[in-house]
Amino acid sequence: MHHRIYLYFLTVLFFVPSTKAQDLYPKNGSVDVQNYVFGLHLNDENNEIQGEAQIVVSFKSETVPFALDLIEKSGEFGMEVTEVLEGTSPAKYSYTENKINIVPTTSESKTQTYTVKYHGIPERGLVISTTKYGNRSFFGDNWPNLARHWLPSVDHPYDKASVEFQITAPDQYDVVATGKKLEESNLENGYKLTIYQEPAPVATKVMTIGVTEFASRLLGDVHDIEVSAWVYPQNRLDGFGDYSVATNVLDYFINTIGPYSYAKLANMQAKTQWGGLENAGTIAYFENSVTGNKTVEPLIAHEIAHQWFGNSATEKSWNHVWLSEGFATYFCILYLESVYGDDRRKEELAIDKKEIFDYYRNNPSPIIDLTIKDPMRVLSTNTYQKGGWVLNMLRYTLGDETFWKGIRKYYATYQNSNALTGDFQQVMEAISGQDLENFFQQWLFTTGHPQLKWKWEYKKGEVIIQLSQIQEHHTFLFPLEIGLVKDGVTTIKTIQMDERSKSFKIKSKDQPDSIVLDPNQWTLFEDMGKL
């Protein structure tokens, strides 16, 4: 029986054509999770959680078998399933290899509700620990695919669903979670029930809860979105001060990109394996992000940018994670540019550029690297900094007005949905009227970057510049700004580098004091010195 179900799974799940996507997670196109309700009971006696999950599933055409991810008990950690119901009746299921395989009864109804009752100690995903001040705490830390350690779910961002958390915990704790608070009730038995509900579809990677003793404060309402800070009581005022910039950041992104998708924006000091984790509407920042001297503005901007890119417009395949991280990296820079001016953009990009070159020397690989099969390995300088640089170059290629128009159209098209790089390319081509195939191919799917050697001389009213690409594997095509510096004034001329080696003549009545390549940080290339 299990064997036949398993073979059926293989045929159904792997028949999903997808261009330029490797991601080995078996996507089941016939089944769509609509909503999760996670009832969780947390206690102080031990780290075991009691769970009851209600999962509303919609079948595209007919009822077919499907699977939920949940890590099985093995030794101390993992979950035991005590009951699975279809509606109110026992469901037909097997629980093996960390998957609950459910065989639905044939039904006229295209939508079914399944209930999974389970308990166990999660090894990861839900971090049960103490804060740096020694207080007991529970923090959801699901990225990329750790929800399966504590939440029965389709643990991949391609299938997003609305979610409700019903948390029963000892009554001294404060609870924050994905969504808007619907209820907080003292149960008069030493426990408290807190319910949060998020109507927008969310990927499991960015669902979270935070349960500990918090100090919380409303930072403001931005376009009717409640913005709050949740920090440890021991560093309350420092935390409120550090996180207060979140209101300005949210305002900037709503005004420049489009509507915010989630019920609220909570900024939470937390135990996380990351510097920040962009959980939908409930961002986690590492414990020591609270310093009292407001150094976390770039981190906050990065994580809030994710609410649009990664959370709402979500990569359909892990290999396309630059649509999340590259975007958050560059939109953080765009926010900083809007506050501090263009020099800040140039500074940030110059730092990132050096990191990209250093990374390339040890890891020659493209941004979209289809050799990567483990989602834990998709994060790199390529998907963050180089991905951000690609957007910077695209902005230069299209011009500000067209770039922003394209970004808004891309977000409007894929809000609360999923996209691959080709989808983003199509939108930018449609808005700009340009063929961007070469741009996307060389910067995202090709390893490396231009490495230039060059020289210049001045003759008879002309600056003659010779440029050579010395990287052997590929000839890049790109525009390049040349700065002619005379008496402290820089005059910019743009050339098109469309060959391996090329010489350019630029008219100039005076001999420049010096020549600068790309003074405004618009092109990703490595200056390898003189020819």
Image (cartoon, grey):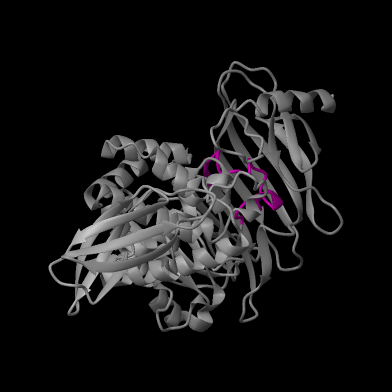
Q: Observer-nearest residue: 395 or 169?
A: 395
- Quick check: can you spot residue 341? yes
- Residue 171 painted magenta: no
Q: Residue at x 38, y 35 (%)?
A: 426
Relative to 30, is 356 above or below?
A: below
Say if residue 229 shows up in the picture.
no
Q: Quadrant of the N terminus?
A: top right
Return the x and y of residue 380 as percentages of the image width and height. Answer: 57, 59
**Is 26 rendered above or below residue 311?**
above
Q: Name the spot of residue 184 as percent of width and height, x first.
A: 51, 59
Q: Quadrant of residue 336?
A: bottom left
Residue 3 x %, y % = 84, 26
Quadrant where the C terminus is found in the figure: bottom left
User: Looking at the image, which is closer to me, 435 or 233?
Assistant: 435
Looking at the picture, tell me which residue is in the foreground, 190 or 277.
277
| Residue 343 at x, y percent in the picture | 29, 72
204 is higher (above) or lower (below) than 227: above
**Rendering quarter of residue 301:** bottom left
Q: Is residue 115 left or right of residue 346?
A: right
- In this view, the residue in front, 485 or 97, is 485
Q: Residue furthest right?
A: 75
> Range of the magenta residues?
142-163
162 to the left or right of 24: left
Q: Is residue 159 magenta?
A: yes
Q: Quadrant of residue 64?
A: top right
Q: Main secondary structure of the magenta part?
A: loop
Residue in view at x 34 percent, y 36 percent: 435
